[in-house]
Image (cartoon, rainbow, N blue to C red):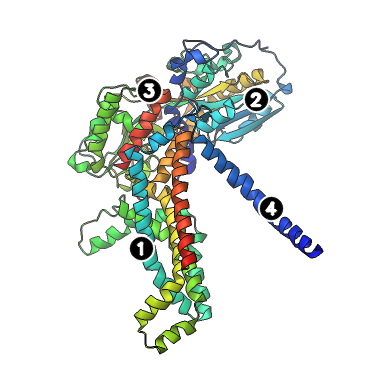
Amino acid sequence: MSRSRGRRLGAFVFLTPGLTYLVVLLLVPLALVLSYTVFQRGRFGGVVYEFTAENFERLVDPLYLDVVIGSLKIAAVTTVIALLAGYPTAYLIAQLPRKWKTIALVAIVLPFWTNFIIRVYAWIILLSGPGLVNSGLKVFGIEPLELLYNEGAIVAGLVYSYLPLMVLPLFAAIEKLDPQLREASANLGASGLTTFRKVTLPLTVPGVLTGSLFVFVPSFGNFVIPELLGGSKSLMVGNLIRQQFLSARDWPFGSTLALALIAVLLVLLVAQAWVARRA
Amino acid sequence: MSRSRFTRRLPAAVAVAGLALAVAACGGESSSSSDGTTVAAADQLKPDADLSKQSLQITVWDGYTPKELPQRVKEKLKVQDMKVALHATNEEAMNKLTAQGDSGVDVAFVSGQYAQALNAQGLLEPIHPELIPNLANLYPEATQLSYDKGNKYSVPYTWGTTGICYRTDLVKSKPTSWNDLLKPPAWAEKKVTMMTTERWLALPALKSLGYSVNTDKDEEITKARELLMAQKPHLLTYDDTTFGDKLVSGEAVMVEAWDGWCPTTDPKGNIAFAVPKEGSDLWVDTMVIMKSSKNKEAAHALINYILDPAIHSWAAENINYKVPNKAAMEKVKIAKGSLLDIPPARLLDGESIIDLGAASTKYTRLSADVQAK
């Protein structure tokens, strides 16, 4: 009795700081944002508390729908590329001797030690018209390519920025895998590919899903990379939301767009949880 | 990203996307009056008030006034204390100033349209010219600004315009018209940039079509959209912040730019600025005194002090914006190629961008539309 009470007290003490933080700084602002979606834009900024459904009507405007669909596409392509590049990387790291494993993992998170914006700028220096890549091509007599300010550059930047978030959960999943399972599979006559398909991959699906989600979510809402590497010539949901809040003074519509973004991500999270449980 | 520069200029940017017309459009909802220029009843102020019993709180963009200003004001005006709060954008300042209750702010720096909007809400103390003898330092033109003719409730701090910034060595002919940017010649193919910040995207197209930058007519905005859509495949990028760097590197040869942002003083001396013949805009950042201020004499004294040529010239020298202060500008050493010498009369040709109220969402949609397609 007293022991269980002690445990409950302990739980209370340990959970309170984190929960308070979440409720005050996450849930309350989120509730505010959600409440704005049904009100009107204030002429001088802010919100006029008069009910309207107009924000949701605007949401289905083909223009904004196209932006949402376009962002989904870019985020999906980014995730697939990051997965294809990240899986072999994670797999190899997991096979390394302990010392090299640590070095490899540090190398993976190393880019996070530099500011995100600076790393994106580095891509501009690489890809721009008079940039490093084109100067290199010039040596071989190849005409300068238009590498920057298009969707390809956006995807390249997103993959680069979020690849570590794919590798780390994959590494965790692959490393946990009991090597004896693969040995057993080989002993029973399965080829390397079959072992991978039938043993390794199915057992690392949760890692694949977590990594994919970690890459997809920030890619979907990103607004810095489309602006810097895409030259603002294509718009993503993040840009749209930023525009509404910072330059259009349209908080209600910005909130509605944010709600749409959250809804898409919630669906994905639920799907991930569902698949992961079945895997 | 040159953030500080961005936020400093954003005032004018956002401002221009500003609030002002709201005032004229809906004078009825403000307590002051219907013509939008009438000011709230003035308080009785004493020119000989004891400033040592007053302290000042101002709100201003980061880097927009000298760092040591509070110290100097305390010494010079003998006020008890002076505190400086910063805002990144006009919107932020508006939130601060229009919140319920006393904001505690005595003097605020906001763009002209926002000053107009604040006044329409009855939040500003009329300027008492007898307490600001240095108003005489202003250019005559600076008292004829469309949002506040006669400086009834605002005093201009900086001003400027928008035009085409270009590389003299990389253009085949000098740009003179917005059409040079909208329909770039072959030598400028994929080497021009445009701004997208709200109303500036539409400005070149609207001006080239002979429309007002403040139009809310759907058919005019649609015409502008057609021009902008036709232009898009020929653009290098849309760029609101780094177009100057793109010119310097040679990636771009012509860009839509605010004058203060066009790097004409680049040591290579190959960058120039042109205001197209179809006309452009005029933006003004101003100082206003809040009705709720309990230190109005000190507030006037502060504005008077800032209008002192020795202080006001700081802005031109350090943030590279023109100041509407004749005496101050005469003090400033203008570097070769600098745009600081655009004469005030030329600036006044520009049309002030004013707030369009509900219609301003049309411009947001236009920006999103042009960028997304």
Q: What element carries label 4?
A: helix
Calculate the distance from the C-alpha at mark 1 to the C-alpha at mark 4: 39 Å
Q: In which quarter of the image is residue B340?
A: top left
Q: How many labels sit on residues?
A: 4
Which callout, 1 or 4, points at the residue further toward the start of the chain? 4
Q: Mark 1 points at which residue?
A: A81
Residues at marks 2 and 3 touching, judged by CB atoms closer than 8 Å: no
Question: Which residue corresponds to mark 3?
Answer: B347
Can residue A118 be spotted in the picture?
A: no
**CA distance for labels 3 and 4:** 57 Å
User: Is A174 situated above or below A155?
Assistant: below
Q: Do labels 2 and 3 share a chain?
A: yes
Marks 1 & 2 on one chain = no
Amino acid found under the numbered disc labelled 1 = Ile
The residue at which mark 2 appears reads as B101
Taking the image as shown, residue A116 lies to the left or right of residue B95, namely left
- Disc 1 sits on a residue from what chain? A
What residue sits 74% from the left and 22% below the top?
B53
Amino acid type assigned to the residue bearing label 2 in the image:
Gly
* Quadrant of the drawing holding the N terminus of chain A: bottom right
Contact between marks 1 and 2 (CB within 8 A): the answer is no
Rate crowding at label 2 as few (under 14), some (14 to 19) or many (20 or more) other CA atoms within 10 Å: few
Residue A87 as seen in the image, left or right of residue B57: left
Mark 4 — residue? A17
Q: Which chain carries label 3?
A: B
